[in-house]
Image (spheres, rainbow, N blue to C red):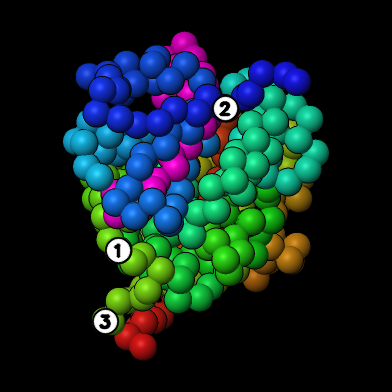
Amino acid sequence: MASDPIRVLEASASCDWGESVEAFLQFLGGSSMILIPGKDRRRTRALCTLLHGNEPSGTIALHRYLKSGQVPAVDLVCFVGAVETAQHEQLFRYRHLPGVRDMNRCFRPPFEDVPGQVAERLLQLLAQHHPECVIDIHNTSGAGPAFGVVSHEDSQHEALVCLFTKHLVVTDLKLGALMELSQPSCPIVTIECGGAGDPRANQVAYEGLVQYASRERVLDLRKGSHLELYHSPARLELAPGASLAFATRAVAGVDLTVPPDLERFNFGTAPVGTFIGWLGGEQSRERLTARNGTGVDRFDEWFRVEEKRLLTTQPLKLFMVTHRQDIALSDCLFYAAPEAGHSSLDR
């Protein structure tokens, strides 16, 4: 049998996790699962982080938690994914290695390549440990507040998200992400802590992790909890071969030029007529889509083109707006959903 793609370690008082996150990653060496014994050994919760090598907050939070020596309420199994990617060339530079699949698009068959094999092995390990829930911690590639993402909305998923944030996106998009495997017996939620490199995002990740680890119950929605809900977001995507630039004026020959400050709308209101960017040639419009999880393209419903300017036609909530050209072209420029009202969860 080939070597195990995930190193399994058990935390103990004698473990030296390193004085820095960089040293911590060097110690791990590759994709790793860390088992932290809890006060109640009969139950287990799972934490996943660093599925993307350029999203450090979850790893920083886990390293800080391990260094603190805290004993969780129940056993914790903690997976640190793209360790080698995070260390490649420059710390936390790459989302995934060039020419290699995004690990958080690998949680459905086939599992033939290296990130697929890691994903498959993680699912096997989770099945062995039977966690009562899973938190998957990420950063956004642009600035903005924290929010949760779920593929199924109920009180258990909402309770987990409330440990970290008051914003919740309910999506029907199917991309091969870990979160999509959520089941009633083991709810899985994604937490986007905020922008990579933002100290506030690191603090959100750490404080939420402490709550997740220390509370006796995390699946019971607390009285008075409150979330803002956003349903069925669409992804503004550029077709393969399309071109994109970030600039304060239209760039000639480019399909879409986006103003560098567009990320200011992350979880703010983008009212009717909000300027998204400049379109290029006559074919540029055909290279843009805004599909939701059911495949419906909302582009013509939510956006209009006026003198080559791309504008919103209704109030939208934009999130995960990126200023990274590589991510915008390989993944999406942003997610969008109609503005949501406040949803009280005092049940």
Quarter containing the N terminus: top right
Q: Which residue is mark 3?
A: 224
Give the mark toward the camera: 2 or 1. Answer: 1
Q: Dot 1 surroundings within 10 Å: few (below 14), some, or many (20 or more)? A: some
Magenta-tinted stretch: 72-96
Quarter containing the C terminus: bottom left
Compared with 225, 61 (above or below) is above
Q: Residue 155: in sight, yes or no?
A: yes
Are circles 3 and 1 on residues that touch, CB within 8 Å?
Answer: no
Location of residue 164 by image quarter: bottom left
Q: Dot 2 surroundings within 10 Å: few (below 14), some, or many (20 or more)? A: some
Report whether 282 appears left or right of 220: right
Q: Which residue is mark 2?
A: 6
Compared with 8, 328 (above or below) is below
Residue placed most toward the observer, 334 or 208: 208
Q: Amino acid at mark 3?
A: Gly
Instruction: Determine the CA span between mark 2 and mark 1.
Output: 29 Å
Who's the residue at 65% across and 35% down the image? 121
> Tag 1 or tag 3, which sits nearer the N-term?
1
Was residue 239 drawn as part of the magenta stretch in this picture? no
Who's the residue at 50% across and 54% down the image? 131
Instruction: Determine the CA span between mark 2 and mark 3.
Output: 40 Å
Res 87 label: none
Q: Which residue is mark 1?
A: 216
Question: Does dot 2 land on a helix, a strand or a loop?
Answer: loop
